[in-house]
Image (cartoon, helix red, strand yellow):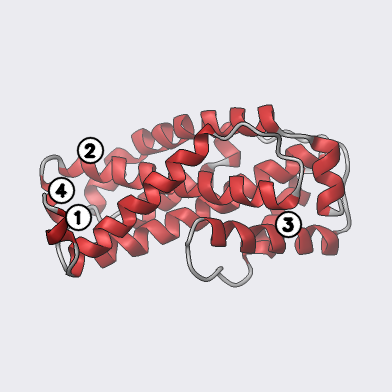
Amino acid sequence: MGRANLDQGAGARTWAIWRRLRSVLAEQFVVSPIRDEAELARFLGTRAAKIAQTGLFGYLRARMGTRATALFEDEAFVPVIERAQRAVFFASLEDLTVYALVHTLQNEQPAEDRLAAAGARLIAAAVVAAEAGEVPEGLALVVGKRVLRVGPGGVPDLGTSFAFSAQAVIDNAPVDEAFKNSDRSIVTGSMRYRWIDVKRQFERRLDRAALRRSLGL
């Protein structure tokens, strides 16, 4: 497909989606320690965007087969994909932010207002890093409450930590409901697998003491 054909209508929007994905994928090669709020926000935003795009698009391509490429350029279908991608991104961002904060806090449990304030700053900056638009109202509060439910010293497992993002793919993918029901376990397993490397990257790069100071927690 020529670039000229991507400069109009749905083609241009599809090109923008893939351009953002390439930018996000490049971030996975960054290995510097995560020791401050800005670096954590960038990690959260870019990794959530990667999971959202590869998870949703992977499912659509698997389900639609060779029709997927044509549908990604369809004027009526592209806005549907964009809405689904946005929903999956924010579910992924919520899951990853909760996981990162729990591991950063370790055995500490800060006051709910400080945790909510830190979460709000992180989410706002992560959304900018991912070029994802406006933050849904109340997202930071939800993140804070999920972190507090885990409690000091808690280590949420892979299934419960990242369940919201897997459910978001099922709920928002433009796929017939009958197929979604039969695909649920496959999609859930696929999304969990995608998160494994993100978890490892975070745990490998985390400078816990420095990051907690930066977050004020």
- Disc 1, SS: loop
Q: Nearer the viewer, mark 4 or mark 3?
A: 4
CA gap, disc 4 and disc 3: 39 Å
* Nearer mark to the viewer, of 2 and 1: 1
Question: Of the residues under marks 3 and 2, which one precedes in the sequence?
Answer: 2
Q: Amino acid at mark 1?
A: Phe
Residue 69 has which mark? 4
* Up-down relation of residue 78 to residue 50 (above or below): below
Please provide percent x and percent y for residue 43.
60, 45
- In this view, the residue in front, 19 or 144, is 19
Relative to 124, residue 137 above or below: below
The image quadrant of residue 75 is: bottom left
Q: Are marks 4 and 2 in contact (CB under 8 Å)?
A: no
- Measure the C-alpha gap from mark 2 to mark 1: 14 Å
Query: The disc labelled 2 sits on which kind of residue?
Result: Ala
Query: Which residue is identified by label 1?
Result: 72
Circle 1 crowding by C-alpha within 10 Å: few under 14, some 14–19, many from 20: many
Residue position for label 2: 62
Would you call the spot at circle 2 few (<14 residues within 10 Å), some (14-19), or many (20 or more)?
A: few
Distance of label 4 from label 2 (alpha carbons): 12 Å
Q: Position of residue 37 (x, y in %)?
A: 74, 51
Residue 146 point in image, percent of width and height: 69, 52
Which marked residue is nearer to the observer: mark 4 or mark 2?
A: 4
Question: On the picture, is 154 further left or further right than 65?
Answer: right
Residue ID at (43%, 47%)? 23
**Quadrant in the picture for residue 179:** top left
- The residue depicted at 46 percent of the width and 29 percent of the height is 193
* Mark 4: few/some/many CA within 10 Å (<14, 14-19, 20+): few
Dot 3 or dot 1, earlier in sequence: 1
Tag 3, which secondary structure? helix
C-beta proximity under 8 Å, tags 4 and 1: yes
